[in-house]
């Protein structure tokens, strides 16, 4: 069995396990003595409440950065699923009280937190916390929340929503009147919230024991900077080219001020880790002010955006937009260091020629024979006399420069860049007959 088949089977296993853990509480309610039924809509509402709570608990494991969980899909796919399924869970949880209010409008009095019993206070507050959680995630930019502030608020509201919902279930006690069922639900909630504690407590403690120091800060084209890090007191980090790590700078790992960045250095040298970061705002806007000697903490490596998972490929196509060249540069440098002779094509889109990050090194890799590399630059604002591709990476540009192959798994396509560009190029690739399984993207829209 090859590695690709193993990843597919593991991916199916995780999906099946997710469905099982979502429905398990419903089956558990039927074990042992059960109270008499109370009408279809009331029981249906209760079932939705239990299923929604189970889905909320499972959100903690989706964001706990377990590599074995994300290996079959990649981090961006898992985070995308986390965002979409959270909206489904929110709708299911919200349907629970709405059905009860529609069935009996007199229950609307339970919304009065002053006069309502404690079981209702817990339930209503849990829903309010969940509404706040969804609101700050959907409208973070409109609310002008700094990324670090959002992450802290997100963790607090998620923990509060689950803890209050657990309290609501125990206080209602209708289906958990038996002590062992109460103990199960308490342990169930503690376990999932414990995963958040692992990410916020245990992992930062482990990072503190493996610090890095900034060895060099190098300006790059395109208002970008490359931070080169060396390990302090340990053997460094082994990673696959194209992966990323969460970086904490000028703060403790416990401060929850980490940011994800792709490695730009070769994976063949774990003692010199490079991260190329474009100054765009918030944290990255101050990256050029970093000085050698500053301490850095890393959580990684993460991600499945790597050619190392595709040894079968006859060659690779890379499509980059702006600073999206970063993980691809790590791949190119690694392949060059390994002496990989497979044919490579890079389609690299930028606004102008002067802003093409790594331009000189890419040309050196192409012309010195270290790689069998063909490069196509696409410029939105080309200089006078430019005879290359202009505008954007369109289906016509791809048709002119993609290598020809009618079979799957011959050429693997790796793409990283701005979200609109990747969406448009992905549609164009599929329209040109490229198999979706041969297209690999790296997206950092984690919120």
Image (cartoon, helix red, strand yellow):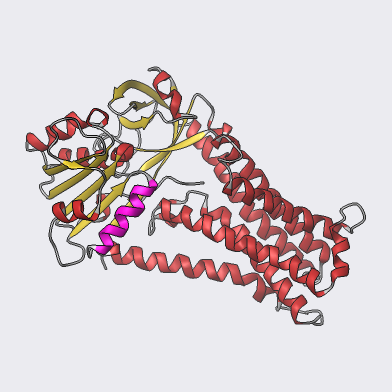
Q: Tell me if residue 175 comes above or below residue 403 in the rendering.
A: below
Is residue 285 at least partly visible in the picture?
A: yes
Q: Nearer the viewer, residue 362 or 51?
A: 362
User: Is residue 245 found left or right of 112 in the rendered image?
Assistant: left
Image coords of residue 388 (percent x, y)? 14, 40
Is 75 drawn above or below residue 283 in the view shown?
A: below
Image location of residue 134, percent across then percent down: 62, 51
Using the rendered image of the protein, determine whether residue 267 is visible from the camera's viewpoint.
Answer: no
Which residues lie in the magenta part?
A: 419-431
Viewer-proximal residue, 59 or 282? 282
**In the rendered image, which quarter is residue 439 located in?**
bottom left
Is residue 89 within the magenta segment? no
Quadrant for the N terminus, please: bottom left
Give the left or right position of residue 52, taking residue 326 as reference. right
Tell me where residue 85 appears, x and y as whole percent. Answer: 54, 61
Residue 138 in the image: above or below residue 245: below
């Amino acid at each position: 069995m090859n590695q690709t088949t193993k990843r597919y089977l593991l991916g199916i296993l995780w999906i099946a396990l997710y469905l099982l853990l979502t429905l398990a509480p419903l089956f558990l309610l039927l074990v042992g003595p059960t109270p008499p039924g109370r009408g279809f809509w009331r029981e249906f509402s209760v079932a939705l409440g239990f299923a929604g709570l189970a889905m909320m608990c499972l959100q903690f494991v989706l964001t706990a950065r377990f590599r074995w969980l994300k290996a079959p899909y990649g981090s961006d796919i898992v985070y995308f699923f986390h965002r979409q399924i959270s909206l489904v869970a929110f709708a299911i949880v919200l349907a629970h009280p709405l059905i009860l209010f529609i069935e009996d409008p007199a229950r609307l009095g339970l919304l009065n937190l002053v006069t309502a019993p404690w079981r209702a206070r817990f339930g209503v507050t849990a829903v309010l916390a969940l509404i706040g959680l969804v609101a700050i995630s959907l409208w973070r930019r409109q609310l002008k929340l700094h990324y670090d502030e959002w992450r802290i608020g997100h963790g607090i509201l998620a923990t509060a929503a689950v803890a209050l919902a657990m309290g609501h279930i125990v206080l209602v006690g209708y289906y958990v009147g038996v002590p062992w069922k109460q103990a199960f639900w308490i342990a169930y909630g503690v376990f999932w919230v414990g995963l958040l504690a692992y990410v916020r407590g245990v992992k930062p403690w482990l990072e503190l024991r493996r610090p890095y120091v900034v060895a060099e800060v190098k300006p790059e084209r395109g208002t970008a900077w490359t931070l080169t890090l060396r390990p302090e007191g340990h053997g460094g980090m082994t990673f696959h080219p194209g992966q990323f790590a969460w970086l904490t700078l000028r703060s403790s790992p416990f401060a929850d001020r980490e940011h994800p960045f792709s490695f730009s250095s070769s994976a063949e040298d774990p003692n010199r880790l490079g991260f190329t970061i474009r100054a765009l705002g918030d944290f990255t806007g101050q990256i050029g002010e970093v000085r050698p000697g500053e301490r850095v903490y890393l959580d990684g490596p993460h991600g499945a955006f790597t050619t190392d998972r595709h040894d079968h490929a006859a060659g690779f196509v890379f499509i980059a937009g702006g600073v999206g060249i970063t993980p691809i540069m790590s791949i190119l440098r690694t392949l060059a260091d390994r002496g990989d002779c497979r044919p490579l094509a890079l389609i690299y889109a930028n606004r102008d020629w002067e802003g093409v990050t790594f331009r000189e090194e890419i040309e050196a890799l192409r012309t010195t024979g270290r790689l069998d590399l063909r490069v196509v630059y696409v410029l939105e604002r080309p200089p006078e006399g430019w005879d290359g591709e202009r505008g954007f990476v369109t289906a016509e540009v791809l048709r002119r420069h993609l290598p020809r192959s009618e079979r799957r798994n011959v050429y693997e396509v790796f793409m990283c860049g701005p979200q609109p560009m990747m969406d448009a190029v992905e549609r164009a690739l599929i329209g040109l007959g490229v198999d979706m399984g041969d297209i690999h993207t790296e997206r950092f829209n984690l919120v």
